[in-house]
């Protein structure tokens, strides 16, 4: 497009993954630099907003955008999230817990469910995803998902789907220590800027 005024100012980011992987903690860490140790199923607000400046890698221009970061209200445990949750997403973070292999096994379901709900077909979609392996602060002995295994998944899932056909970007994070959280959200927001 030719004019910045035609570009979207509001970008919707959606965070998906099994219950307990740390989606709400990641969002809160990114949004307000806070981490609360106690478990609390998310209730209430559908999204948090954050204003950021993102350099558009295509044009070089810095874009001032408002990120709407959508988190589940804990419904991921019981039922599907409903189309309103997914609709209009500009980028999606898929989150697993590096110490929980099952949360990694479920990534395909989350990705497939998203693509189905927004009417994108599995093969053709170049929709921007970012993969986040959370809780890397866990002791080494608790790790169940290696970095290599996750990167292989990113290559398979990204094949022919992203612009340029590259793998889905992968980050290992800790919402507890804040390790890599900003980097993961920056990539997510940058992909949203490109895609929107
Ligand atoms: P959600 O169900 O995906 O939203 O997960 P929550 O954000 O509610 O987190 C589930 C539990 O994991 C809580 O007890 C969090 O304190 C904990 N948790 C979240 N992120 C991390 C992390 O990076 N490291 C550790 N050690 N615990 C985490
Ligand atoms: Mg939650």
Image (cartoon, grey):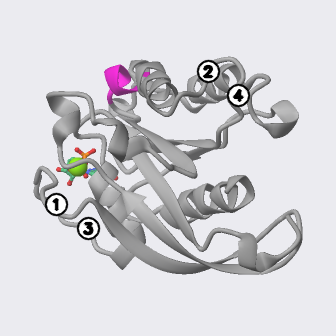
Asked where in the image residue 35 lies, by quadrant, the reply is bottom left
Of the residues tagged 2 and 1, which is closer to the observer? 2
Give the alpha-carbon distance from disc 2 to disc 1, as whole Å.
39 Å
The residue shown at (27%, 36%) is 81
The residue nearer to you, when weighing 162 against 19, is 162
Give the alpha-carbon distance from disc 1 to disc 4, as whole Å.
34 Å
Query: Mark 2 or mark 3: which comes first in sequence?
Result: 3
Above/below status of 48 relative to 98: below
Query: Mark 2 or mark 1: which comes first in sequence?
Result: 1
Which quarter shows the N terminus?
Answer: bottom right
In the rendered structure, are the residues bearing label 2 and label 3 in contact, judged by CB atoms less than 8 Å apart? no
In the rendered structure, are the residues bearing label 2 and label 1 in contact, judged by CB atoms less than 8 Å apart? no
Q: Is mark 2 within 8 Å of ligand 1?
A: no
Q: Label for residue 37? A: 1
Q: Is mark 4 within 8 Å of ligand 1?
A: no
Which residues fall within the magenta stretch?
A: 100-104
Which quarter shows the C terminus?
Answer: bottom right
Task: Return the residue at label 3.
Answer: 35
């Amino acid at each position: 497009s030719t004019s910045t005024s035609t570009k979207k100012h509001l970008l919707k980011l959606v965070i998906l993954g099994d219950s307990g992987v740390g989606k709400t903690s990641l969002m809160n860490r990114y949004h307000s630099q806070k981490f609360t140790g106690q478990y609390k199923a998310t209730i209430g607000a559908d999204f948090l907003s954050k204003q950021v400046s993102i350099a558009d890698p295509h044009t070089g221009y810095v874009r001032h955008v408002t990120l709407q970061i959508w988190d589940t209200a804990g419904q991921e445990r019981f039922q599907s999230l409903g189309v309103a949750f997914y609709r209009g997403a500009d980028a999606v973070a898929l989150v697993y817990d590096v110490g929980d292999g099952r949360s990694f096994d479920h990534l395909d379901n989350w990705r497939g469910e998203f693509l189905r709900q927004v009417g994108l077909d599995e093969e053709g979609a170049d929709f921007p995803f970012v993969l986040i392996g959370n809780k890397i602060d866990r002791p080494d002995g608790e790790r169940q998902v290696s970095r290599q295994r996750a990167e292989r998944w990113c290559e398979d899932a990204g094949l022919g789907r992203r612009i340029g056909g590259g793998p889905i970007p992968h980050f290992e994070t800790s919402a507890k220590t804040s390790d890599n959280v900003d980097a993961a959200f920056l990539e997510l927001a940058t992909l949203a800027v490109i895609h929107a």
